[in-house]
Image (tube, rainbow, N blue to C red):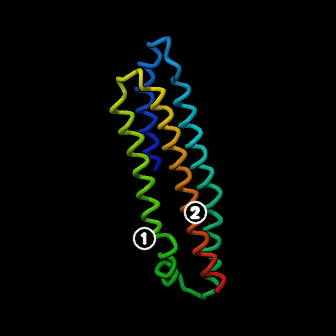
């Protein structure tokens, strides 16, 4: 995902030159950067907050079930890889592709840049929402198993 954000930032920097060249443009490079920075910060925060808690819950399940390290690697896999998680990951990749492809196709159309900014905001917000939903799903699944 970080690779996708780096590509997105590169694309947005490419968009900045046409935006600065047109004085009447309502959107600026800073507008694009702010949206990307906000989304990147939200995704980083999600990972920093959820990863340690999720790992602790996995260890709790391991201890509760008395799994060896080898058993744990096998038994814990469904909590980090299943069809629903793959679907969340695919949605995230689709949003990243839409963000980068949309920007590339309209990089020279200065009059559409503000519309592109709105689309970018929407796609990045959907990306963050998808990741939040993924974490919620993973925690719900794990917590239900611990509760058995």
Q: Nearer the viewer, residue 63 or 38?
A: 38
Q: Nearer the viewer, residue 148 or 67?
A: 148
Name the disc covering residue 83, or none.
1
**The C terminus lies in which quarter of the figure?**
bottom right
Q: Which residue sits at x=56%, y=60%?
A: 133
Percent x, y of residue 109: 36, 23
The residue tagged 2 is 135
Relative to 133, is 91 on the left or the right? left
Relative to 109, is 74 on the left or the right? right
Could you tell me if the residues under marks 1 and 2 are in contact, i.e. CB atoms within 8 Å?
no
Percent x, y of residue 126: 52, 49
Q: Nearer the viewer, residue 91 or 49?
A: 91
Q: Which residue sits at x=46%, y=80%?
A: 74
Percent x, y of residue 80: 50, 70
Q: Secondary structure at mark 1?
A: helix
Q: Which residue sits at x=48%, y=26%?
A: 114
């Amino acid at each position: 995902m970080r690779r996708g954000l780096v590509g997105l930032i590169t694309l947005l920097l490419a968009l900045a030159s046409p935006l600065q060249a047109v004085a009447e443009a309502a959107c600026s490079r800073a507008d694009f950067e702010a949206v990307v920075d906000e989304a990147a910060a939200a995704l980083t925060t999600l990972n920093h907050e959820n990863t340690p808690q999720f790992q602790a819950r996995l260890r709790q399940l391991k201890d509760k079930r008395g799994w060896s390290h080898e058993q744990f690697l096998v038994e814990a896999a469904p909590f980090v890889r299943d069809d629903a998680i793959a679907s969340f990951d695919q949605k995230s990749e689709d949003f990243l592709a839409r963000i980068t492809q949309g920007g590339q196709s309209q990089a020279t159309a200065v009059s559409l840049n503000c519309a592109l900014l709105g689309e970018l905001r929407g796609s990045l917000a959907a990306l963050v929402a998808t990741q939040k939903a993924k974490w919620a799903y993973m925690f719900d699944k794990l917590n239900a198993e611990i509760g058995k």
